[in-house]
Amino acid sequence: MSKQTALLVFGGVSSEHEISRLSAACWARSLDRSKFELLYLGITKQGKWLLFEGDADAIADGSWETGSVTPCVLSPDRNHHGLVVLGEQPRVVHIDVVLPILHGKNGEDGTIQGLLELSGIPYVGCGVLAAACCMDKAVTNTLLDAAGIARCEWDWAWAEDALAEFDALASRLEQSLHYPIFVKPANAGSSVGISKAVNKQELKKAIEVAAKEDRKIVFERFVQGQEVECAVIGNHTPTSTLPGEILASQDFYTYDDKYVCGTSRTQIPANLSQQQLEQVQQQAVKAYKALGCEGLTRVDFFVEKGTGAILLNELNTLPGFTAISMYPQLMAHYGTPLPQLMEQLIALAMERTAKHNG
């Protein structure tokens, strides 16, 4: 049986560039090379696309950019069905499947997915619309509300309006959400730009922080409770693991807590009753379908202290694949180790493309 050629895309211009490299290195180390020929396409922080010939360690530590690299582009021409390498003698390399291991903007927001749809190349993860909707927290929340999926009270504003009309906005939020209020850029991942405001002065500062990341800002009522996450996988008939629990070492699950300090802990399954575990699992699948997700998504919830309410927080269409990431931990705990998981995700990508083109 001949090998399939998989293109691993990593890096990118988002604030999660470094995490993308770590996730990509995990894929590079775990994918079964007896079944797949693996090529690497790295995107620098400046947006330069380079075919990299090296190893996973260089991807992880960022030294890949000084290694053996050649400019390249993914071709939208379906006759190419692959990569155009722009060396001294330009050539086209056929690609069977793309692994877009890109977090945040330009990675899981529908942009690269659109290019891949044009190219006709199967790719791992959600399609254009689901990726774009799940990336934008205001759009996600609106669709969840329409689908009847419980979440905390929330509001949103354009960053420019929030700053220009701050007093009116603050008054509105104080009446509807009350302090503490979480302030988030609508389009950013891994807790980047998120702040917890406990008064009007902190609210303004939090808006300024979030505005550096995105033009749209989301405001949410603070929920005191457990942070739990499900790993959902599949296309038309998705399944979900039972949830695992994030035991954050800080006031809330920050970017540093996730990736820099390494001080957060996880518990699988979450410390909930069996009934609650199953309710979270069911809501994860319901949200996955409501947002049109395919391939994989991590669905995050709060279980509120006191009320026991299960409140959906967000959907992450390309969750981390680092050593401490919850999605692969959950899948492994429930019987799907990394190499098998990766093959399953590739098979789902092939299945979706065949169905759409059929």
Image: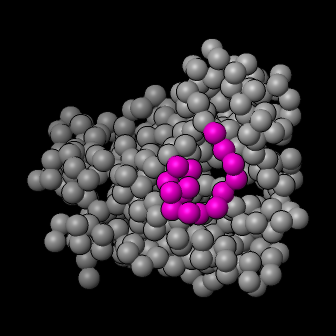
Residue 167 drawn above or below residue 341? above
In screen coordinates, is 77 left or right of 6?
left
Residue range highlighted in magenta = 141-155
215, 193: nearer the viewer: 215
Can residue 194 be seen here? The reply is: no
25, 260: nearer the viewer: 260
Q: Residue at x 68, y 25 (%)?
A: 169
147, 39: nearer the viewer: 147
Q: Residue at x 22, y 67 (%)?
A: 356
103, 159: nearer the viewer: 159
Residue 97 drawn above or below residue 74? below
Which quadrant holds the N terminus? Answer: bottom left
Q: How is the image coloured?
A: one colour
Query: Residue 267, position in %: x, y?
Result: 79, 71
In screen coordinates, is 118 left or right of 109?
left
* Count of labels in the image: 0
| Residue 164 lies in quadrant | top right
Query: Residue 15, position in %: x, y?
Result: 58, 36
Which quadrant holds the C terminus? Answer: bottom left
Query: Residue 336, position in %: x, y?
Result: 56, 81
Query: Residue 145, position in %: x, y?
Result: 56, 55
